[in-house]
């Protein structure tokens, strides 16, 4: 992305003035004010414009203690860092669906993979089963076309975004971790966007339920975990639950969403402009948001998976794309 | 996994003696502090001596907001108040078991209640039904499970019987005594902290097994439960004790507090004694049970006002005793 001269000058002045009047006028002219939804083509994903702004990324020790986040996980979430998103951007209102991913596969003759790290009942883990063919078309559980595409690798996600860019002429990306968390928080300062009422999560997100627990044969690994009563075992159609205040669905739960950042142990040295980190281990990528089989404490905006090889295809991993607004 | 920590120790102690024990952590980790116990007779409840002290009881609006507690319940838990226990007292190490309750019924020829409140899956309500009692609460129990279908009147009658039998002043604990003992020196919503998650390994809280056994009632949709096959009560002391050495202060069976019902804690007594004036036709419960939403198992919870002769298949009790 090339920055105009006025952007550079304003960046030097300070965050409060970052959204230049000229830029705002240009966005307004294009109709892309925050809250506006659009599609760049008939079968493109619906995108919503989110405002420029500042937020605190990561979690405090207090939050992690309150939520019972084990240190092995939670230590990745600190220290908190102030991020300033200088320009509005657009984010897909939903996870990329199977139908949407299928269009990409068809258009690009992309081979269908043979391996997906799905639930292995014999070993009671999520490492998949040697010799078992599994992929987004057959992840080992039932899905419809409007369910999120699963068994996605980071490479699948970034290739999909690149294809979207080529197809539309706009700049699509996998969301940066900062962009992702900014949208998941949607202008709120609480642990989750609806506030601190933790049990609301059972009505707000598709996380581990009694049905999931039953479907994985009452797995020992999940025994005595806190789950929601429910009848949905795996993914649900995107946008089955309420949107967050910015009109975005399923930021928590349903599927993990890859972000663009190279893996780092924590937020130390995080760029503060909302861009993706490039200073970590770029063979590994972070994922956010928790999924249909996640424990309660995993489904928080601050949660970041510890990072894993970007070529891995976890059964519960999907895609969330963003688009630049020029 | 439930573990058996030997309350049997107390049965081996000579009646009337005060003993001391310390239980190793489940994983061989740090030892729990020494627990002083009193057993006044063979078969009497194992009583734990609770140290004198001062604590803040009740809950803050922040705690209630986080727990998602409905205001009709939540406002009863506030405001927080300071209670000072000038002298040690003793409280039951466990809920009164069915075996202990049976001894009382047999000795006093106490008639069984006309019925007991159980869950009716047809209407998804919890009304009283004839034919149910502590002998048959609608699910399988052994004599080591907590006695349930116990009314406030039953509980106080048991305490009077035990007092007459032993010559010591047994009673139902006051709300403050119960909560001070449940907190075990902690100020967090549960003695284990603020995260409900950990409760699944520390007490018999609502589980997927309960939901299945109750026929997945619509009234219990979209709420937290523990993932396990347990359905109803478990034997007392199946889970680790709290910092004071007490078992099942969160979950398993609801427990009566001695206090008369009141709107909230603004009339709480600074000396930790029970409020015995006001709405004394009704009393309330502490500790939550195997079927309650998670927020009902916090230390500060005051259950809804209930008539003294109400029997429910989730309600039991434990006793307290003054130390003279």
Image (tube, grey):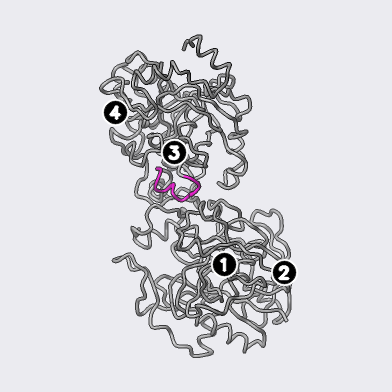
A285 lies left or right of B33: left
Specify whether disc 1 shares its chain with disc 4: no
Label 1 or label 3, whichever lies nearer to me, is: 1
**Closer-to-camera residue (A270/B145):** A270
Q: Is residue B143 magenta?
A: no
Could you say where residue A157 lies in the image, as x and y percent from the top left?
41, 23
User: Which residue has dot 2 on it?
Assistant: B51
Task: Report how far apart the C-alphas of labels 2 and 1 lie in the structure.
Answer: 23 Å
Q: Can residue B315 be seen in this view?
A: yes
Q: Label 1 lies in what chain? A: B
Q: Residue at x 65, y 58 (%)?
A: B186
Farthest residue in the left direction?
A42
The kind of secondary structure element at disc 1 is: helix
User: Which residue has dot 3 on it?
Assistant: A252
Task: Looking at the image, tell me whether mark 2 or mark 1 is earlier in sequence order.
Answer: 2
Q: Does the magenta stretch include residue A199?
A: yes
Q: Is residue B251 above or below residue A70?
A: below
Q: Residue at x 42, y 74 (%)?
A: B137
**Closer-to-camera residue (B141/B78):** B78
User: Which residue has dot 1 on it?
Assistant: B265
**Closer-to-camera residue (A291/A186):** A186
Task: Report how far apart the C-alphas of labels 4 and 2 lie in the structure.
Answer: 65 Å
The kind of secondary structure element at disc 3 is: loop
The stretch in magenta equals A195-206
């Amino acid at each position: 992305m090339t920055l105009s001269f006025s952007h550079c000058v304003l960046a030097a002045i300070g965050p409060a003035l970052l959204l230049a009047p000229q830029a705002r006028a240009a966005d307004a002219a294009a109709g892309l004010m925050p809250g506006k939804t659009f599609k760049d083509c008939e079968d493109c994903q619906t995108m919503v414009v989110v405002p420029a702004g500042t937020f605190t990324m990561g979690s405090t020790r207090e939050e992690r203690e309150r939520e019972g986040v084990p240190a092995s996980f939670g230590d990745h979430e600190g220290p908190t860092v102030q991020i300033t998103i200088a320009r509005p951007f657009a984010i897909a209102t939903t996870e990329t669906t199977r139908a949407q991913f299928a269009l990409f596969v068809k258009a690009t003759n992309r081979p269908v993979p043979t391996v997906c790290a799905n639930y292995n009942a014999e070993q009671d883990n999520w490492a998949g089963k040697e010799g078992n063919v599994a992929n987004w078309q057959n992840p080992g559980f039932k899905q419809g076309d409007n369910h999120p595409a699963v068994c996605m690798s980071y490479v699948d996600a970034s290739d999909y975004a690149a294809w979207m860019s080529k197809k539309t002429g706009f700049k699509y990306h996998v969301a940066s971790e900062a962009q992702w968390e900014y949208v998941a928080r949607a202008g709120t300062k609480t642990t989750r966007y609806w506030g601190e009422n933790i049990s609301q999560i059972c009505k707000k997100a598709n996380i581990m339920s009694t049905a999931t627990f039953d479907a994985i044969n009452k797995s020992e690994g999940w025994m005595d975990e806190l789950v929601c009563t429910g009848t949905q075992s795996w993914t649900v159609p995107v946008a089955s639950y309420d949107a967050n205040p910015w009109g975005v669905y399923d930021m928590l739960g349903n599927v993990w969403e890859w972000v663009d950042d190279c893996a780092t142990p924590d937020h130390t040295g995080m760029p503060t402009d909302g861009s993706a980190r490039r200073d970590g281990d770029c063979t590994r990528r972070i994922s956010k948001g928790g999924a249909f089989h996640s424990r309660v404490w995993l489904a928080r905006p601050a949660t970041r998976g510890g990072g894993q090889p970007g070529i891995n295809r976890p059964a519960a991993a999907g895609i969330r794309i963003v688009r630049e607004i020029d | 996994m439930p573990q058996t920590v030997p309350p049997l120790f107390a049965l081996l102690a000579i009646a009337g003696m005060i003993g001391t024990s310390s239980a190793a952590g489940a994983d061989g980790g740090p030892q729990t502090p020494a627990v002083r116990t009193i057993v006044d007779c063979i078969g009497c409840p194992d009583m734990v001596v609770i140290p004198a002290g001062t604590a803040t009881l009740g809950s803050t609006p922040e705690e209630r907001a986080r727990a998602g507690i409905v205001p009709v319940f939540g406002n009863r838990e506030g405001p927080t108040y300071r209670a000072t226990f000038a002298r040690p007292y003793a409280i039951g190490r466990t809920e009164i078991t069915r075996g202990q309750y049976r001894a009382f019924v047999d000795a006093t020829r106490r008639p069984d209640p006309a019925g007991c409140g159980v869950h009716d899956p047809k209407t998804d309500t919890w009304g009283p039904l004839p034919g149910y009692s502590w002998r048959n609460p609608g699910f399988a129990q052994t004599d080591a499970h907590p006695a349930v279908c116990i009314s406030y009147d039953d509980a106080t009658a048991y305490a009077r019987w035990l007092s007459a039998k032993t010559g010591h002043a047994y009673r139902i604990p006051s709300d403050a005594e119960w909560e001070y003992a449940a907190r075990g020196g902690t100020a967090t919503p549960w003695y284990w902290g603020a995260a409900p998650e950990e409760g699944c390994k520390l007490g018999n809280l609502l589980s997927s097994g309960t939901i299945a056994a109750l026929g997945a009632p619509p009234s219990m949709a979209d709420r937290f439960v523990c993932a396990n096959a347990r359905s109803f009560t478990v034997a007392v002391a199946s889970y680790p004790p709290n910092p004071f050495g007490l078992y099942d202060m969160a979950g398993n069976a609801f427990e009566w507090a001695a206090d008369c019902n009141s709107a909230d804690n603004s009339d709480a007594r600074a000396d930790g004694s029970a409020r015995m004036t006001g709405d004394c036709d009704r009393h309330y419960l502490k500790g939550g049970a195997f079927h309650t939403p998670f927020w009902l198992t916090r230390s500060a919870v005051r259950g809804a006002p209930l008539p003294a002769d109400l029997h429910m298949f989730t309600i039991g009790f434990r006793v307290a005793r003054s130390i003279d």
